[in-house]
């Protein structure tokens, strides 16, 4: 999944060096005052979540649909379930590689505890960026409307929140899946649900990052192995949660797969559309 790695891997500077632009402020302001306070109290985990939401919420729709179309063009006979399986493997591979890299870098003699911690924080940002992108692409595969920023945010937060997030959405509006429920909510209801979801997601993310962080800061070799294991476990949870929360895939596609010459190379597509 090199095209996603190249694009997402360069996005950590705004978190690592404290840059806070108008888009990040807008994402934070979209939540209620209670959620804003929780985000502030959550420290790095809250900042990483806000930055990841910012990037994927503002990523143009064609970057996400282009990735799915590219997979379909390479596998024209594949069913939605088979395309989802390819997406799962791409995401887990990316997450596993970044975990090993952070674990190794954090333990290099002379790099220092603080620098190692910053490396792990940047890697956590890449992981959440990838998880958010993967979630929205998975929702699109199920026919979700990914054009509206608030609905896109809700889809990401439901997947990151696990069963608690799914239960919250299901309780808000009776539907067969979170995708269906979110698509039927009014804009006001979506924002209200997002305020609740961000609290659940932050709690989940904070716990998982703390557990993974401890392993990655271990001595050389051990940190790399534990980093790989931690991120593989985290990625597997995201894959499972996404499948559970977004609901069943359609059995077939409504449209034929695009030909390879109709689809832009994802590296160029993503690089041109990610908003700093």
Image (cartoon, grey):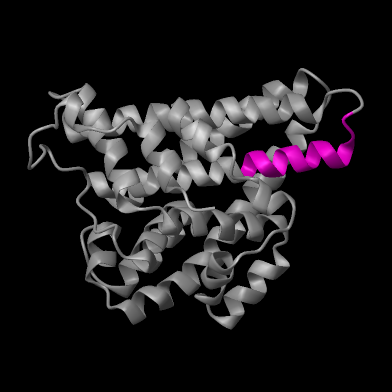
Among the 4 quarters of the image, the one containing residue 218:
top right
Residue 132 at x, y percent in the picture:
45, 48
Among the 4 quarters of the image, the one containing residue 227:
top right
Whether residue 138 is visible, yes or no, is no
Residue 56 at x, y percent in the picture:
44, 53
The part of the chain drawn in magenta is 111-124
Q: Residue at x 60, y 52 (%)?
A: 205
Q: Quadrant of the N terminus?
A: top left
> Residue 114 lies in magenta, yes or no?
yes
Whether residue 71 is visible, yes or no, is yes
Nearer to us in this view, 183 or 16: 16
Residue 52 at x, y percent in the picture:
53, 53
As displayed, is residue 49 above or below residue 141? below
Q: Residue at x 34, y 52 (%)?
A: 245
- Residue with the most extreme top position: 221
Q: Residue at x 54, y 80 (%)?
A: 32
* Image-based side of 203 in relation to 223, left or right: left
Residue 106 at x, y percent in the picture:
79, 31
């Amino acid at each position: 999944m090199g095209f996603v790695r190249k694009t997402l891997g360069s996005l950590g500077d705004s978190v690592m060096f404290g840059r806070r632009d108008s888009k990040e402020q807008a994402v934070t302001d979209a939540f209620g005052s209670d959620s804003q306070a929780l985000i502030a109290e959550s420290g790095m985990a809250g900042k990483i979540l806000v930055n990841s939401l910012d990037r994927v919420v503002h990523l143009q729709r064609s970057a996400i649909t282009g990735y799915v179309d590219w997979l379909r063009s390479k596998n024209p006979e594949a069913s939605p379930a088979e395309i989802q399986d390819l997406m799962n493997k791409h995401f887990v591979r990316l997450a596993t590689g970044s975990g090993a890299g952070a674990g190794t870098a954090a333990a290099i003699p002379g790099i220092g505890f603080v620098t190692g911690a910053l490396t792990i924080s940047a890697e956590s940002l890449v992981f959440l960026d990838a998880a958010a992108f993967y979630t929205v692409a998975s929702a699109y595969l199920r026919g979700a409307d990914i054009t509206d920023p608030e609905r896109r945010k809700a889809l990401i937060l439901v997947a990151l929140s696990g069963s608690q997030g799914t239960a919250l959405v299901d309780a808000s509006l009776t539907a067969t899946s979170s995708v269906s429920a979110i698509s039927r909510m009014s804009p006001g209801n979506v924002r209200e649900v997002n305020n609740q979801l961000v609290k659940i997601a932050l709690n989940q993310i904070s716990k998982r990052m703390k557990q993974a962080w401890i392993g990655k800061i271990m001595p050389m070799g051990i940190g790399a192995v534990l980093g790989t294991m931690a991120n593989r476990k985290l990625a597997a949870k995201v894959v499972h949660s996404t499948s559970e929360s977004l609901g069943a895939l359609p059995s077939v596609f409504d449209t034929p797969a695009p030909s390879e010459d109709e689809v832009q190379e994802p590296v160029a597509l993503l690089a041109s559309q990610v908003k700093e």
